[in-house]
Image (cartoon, rainbow, N blue to C red):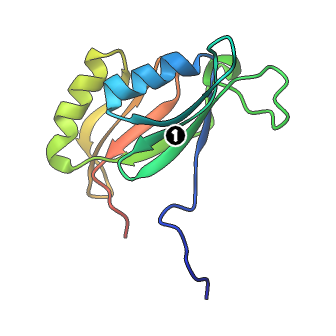
Amino acid sequence: MVDNVPAQTVYPNLKYADPKAAIAFLAEAFGFTAHFVVETPDGTVEHAQLRVGNQLIFLSKDQPADRYGMHSPLALKGTSHALCVWVPDSALDEHQRRAQERGARILNPVHASIAGVREYSCADPENQVWTFSSYTGE
């Protein structure tokens, strides 16, 4: 048995060509908040942590020679993942409206999924894919 397991044990790390713009968009459109931001001397965001509810996601600057081969969907011309974020069912319609008004591209509007939860999916300005869902785990 493991003692003192933290509340969060997985920290998604997304690459953005313009992390500063991404932080502003994610705050405005989705309600995320900056928790920790590291800037280079010229003001470029190199790394950031954003609070999403009581969880953190990491953002970092897309680097052409990234040692892990990780890149922004803009560089990849697509993406290989989507993040799913819990939103109360009663707030989903308003959440989608706000995201769309601020520039999110709605990929699948609010609907009842086959799994029995309501959700919607969208892409942010760099084409990261997000699903906002009333799913709370099993």
The residue furthest front is: 41
Relative height, residue 15 to residue 83 (above, below): above
Q: Quadrant of residue 131?
A: top left
- Could you tell me residue 49's position as x and y percent? 53, 39
Label 1 residue SS: strand
- Could you tell me residue 43's position as x and y percent? 62, 14
Disc 1 residue type (three-letter): Ala
Q: In the image, 94: left or right of 130?
A: left
Q: In the image, 62: left or right of 92?
A: right
Residue 4 shows up from this direction: yes
The residue furthest left is: 90
- Could you tell me residue 20's position as x and y percent? 53, 19
Q: In the image, 105: left or right of 42?
A: left
Count of numbered marks: 1
Residue for point 67% across, 11% down: 42
Per the image, the residue denoted by label 1 is: 82
Q: In the image, 33: left or right of 20?
A: left
Residue for point 26% across, 54% down: 117
Q: Nearer the viewer, residue 54 or 133?
A: 54
Instruction: Report the quarter where the N terminus lies.
Output: bottom right
Residue for point 18% across, 35% down: 93
Residue for point 80% across, 19% down: 64
The residue furthest top is: 42
Residue 126 shows up from this direction: no
The 10 Å Cα crowd at callout 1, few under 14, some 14 to 19, many 20 or more, is few
Q: Quadrant of residue 66?
A: top right
- Could you tell me residue 138's position as x and y percent? 37, 70
Q: Quadrant of residue 105?
A: top left
The residue furthest bottom is: 1
